[in-house]
Image: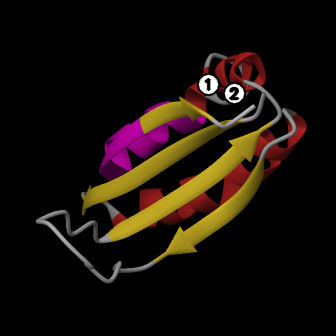
């Protein structure tokens, strides 16, 4: 069953570091079978109070593959860089069978 990582960028702390992260992260996602579905700027609010400044959704073949990427040695330094560069909310959810 596929799994999706949904990331909401809340605040940019260092634009240069964030750009370095963005330039380097895609190959790590792809190595674990991940692919992007949404990379957006501001979202249009249809209902409620949620106003994410930027939203990213990417899919992995399984929850296990997503967690292998998240915990991988190659993503660890990028994760640290992202945390220096910006504040994100991120969740992992499983898709429908």
Residue closest to the far left: 49
In this rendering, position of residue 67 left or right of residue 9: right
In this rendering, position of residue 74 left or right of residue 46: right
What secondary structure do most residues of the magenta stretch adopt? helix
Crowd rating for badge 2 (residues with CA inside 10 Å; few <14, some 14–19, many 20+) = many
Circle 1 SS class: helix
Q: Position of residue 84 (x, y in %)?
A: 34, 42
Query: Do residues under tags 1 and 2 come within 8 Å of each other at their CB atoms?
Result: yes
Q: Tell me what residue is drawn at x 57 percent, y 55 percent.
A: 57
Q: Tell me what residue is drawn at x 65 percent, y 51 percent.
A: 58
Q: Nearer the viewer, mark 1 or mark 2?
A: 2
Residue 2, magenta (yes or no) = no
The residue to which callout 2 is attached is: 66
- Residues in magenta? 78-90
Q: Is residue 24 above or below residue 75?
A: below
Q: Position of residue 88 (x, y in %)?
A: 33, 46
Q: Position of residue 12 (x, y in %)?
A: 28, 62
Residue 70: mark in rendering: 1
């Amino acid at each position: 069953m596929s799994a999706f990582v949904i990331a909401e960028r809340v605040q940019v702390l260092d634009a240069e570091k964030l750009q370095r992260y963005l330039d380097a992260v895609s190959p790590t996602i792809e190595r674990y079978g991940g692919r992007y579905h949404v990379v957006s700027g501001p979202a249009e609010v249809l209902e409620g109070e949620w106003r994410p400044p930027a939203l990213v959704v990417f899919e992995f073949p399984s929850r296990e593959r997503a967690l292998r990427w998240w915990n991988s040695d190659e993503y660890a330094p990028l994760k640290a860089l992202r945390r220096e560069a910006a504040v994100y909310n991120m969740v992992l959810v499983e898709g429908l069978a």
